Image (cartoon, grey):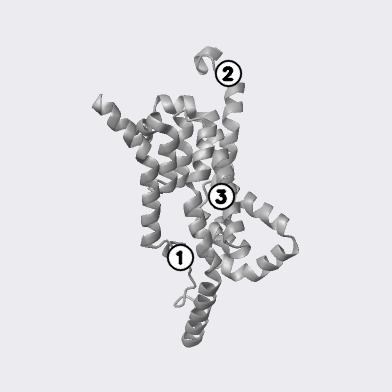
Amino acid sequence: MNVRQGERFPKGTGGAGAWVRRLWPLGLLLAGTALVFAMGWGSYLSLESLAENRAALAQAIDANLPLALLIFVALYAATVALSVPGGAALTLAGGLLFGWFVGGVASVIGATLGAAVVFLAAKSALSDLVAAKAGPWLERFRQGFQEDAFHYLLFLRLVPIFPFWLVNLAPALLGVSFTTYLAATAIGIIPGTFAYSLAGNGLDSVIEAQQALHQSCLAKMGAGGQESCPYTLDPGALLTPELIAGLVALGLVALVPVLVKWFRRRAV
């Protein structure tokens, strides 16, 4: 039975061709994410992998610094765009390999570019459909973005109470402008990014100490001691209570304009 185009696709969408054009960027991102997980490439974005390869990476950076920075930014952007875990480890790696300032700047640029890709793909493919049928997970953001999109998004970036990928998607689906999204994202991730980059800058001694402990454990355990002597470096351990308190304080400052507007409206 033949079905007319108007019955298969919503009015004004332009039919199947228009939907393909809208959905292919998001489909490409999802396919890329599936490929990364299927191939296990995400395991390379870890401090353990960094510790094992830091000498070779340092040598490659010394040979061609501009190219190394370009590759790092591209890798960071791809990691964020594909929502692959490993952003914290990459930020630490940037501080270790390039120094806290250059590594921090490169991480901010990479994270912002990756977030921009997610925003544009989601806005193109899903904004009309999802915003009209928003679930509770999206509705909790709606009022904040309607009140003051820039400061609310800045607060969400400064205080990571929601996953980074979720904060990338929500503004795209709730009509936040691209310029507002880009500016709030770039500014909002600076404190946390540079905090991790600073931690990464001093990570060399931590890696060496952990490797020494690992080798000592292996020597004591003898053959088959690999399972009893795991080599782990947890980036979360570098996120101290003081650093978390500082980021929360910055986030509350960013939220002040939103709260002022709310109180003014209640007072009228």
- The kind of residue on which mark 1 rests is Asp
Label 3, secondary structure: give it.
Answer: helix
Identify the residue at image location x=59%, y=34%: 25
Give the residue furthest to the right. Answer: 63
Residue 55: x and y in percent read 65, 71
Which residue bears the numbered disc 2? 15
Judged by depth in the image, the label closer to the viewer, 2 or 3, is 3
Sequence-wise, which precedes: disc 1 or disc 2? 2
Sequence-wise, which precedes: disc 1 or disc 3? 3
* Left or right relative to 8: residue 54: right
Residue 4: x and y in percent read 54, 12
- C-alpha span from label 2 to label 3: 39 Å
Q: Which mark is residue 212?
A: none
| Front-most of residues 245 and 218 | 245
Instruction: Check whether the beta carbons of the residues at disc 1 and disc 2 lie within 8 A of each other.
Output: no
- The kind of residue on which mark 3 rests is Val
Judged by depth in the image, the label closer to the viewer, 1 or 3, is 3
Give the residue furthest to the left. Answer: 267
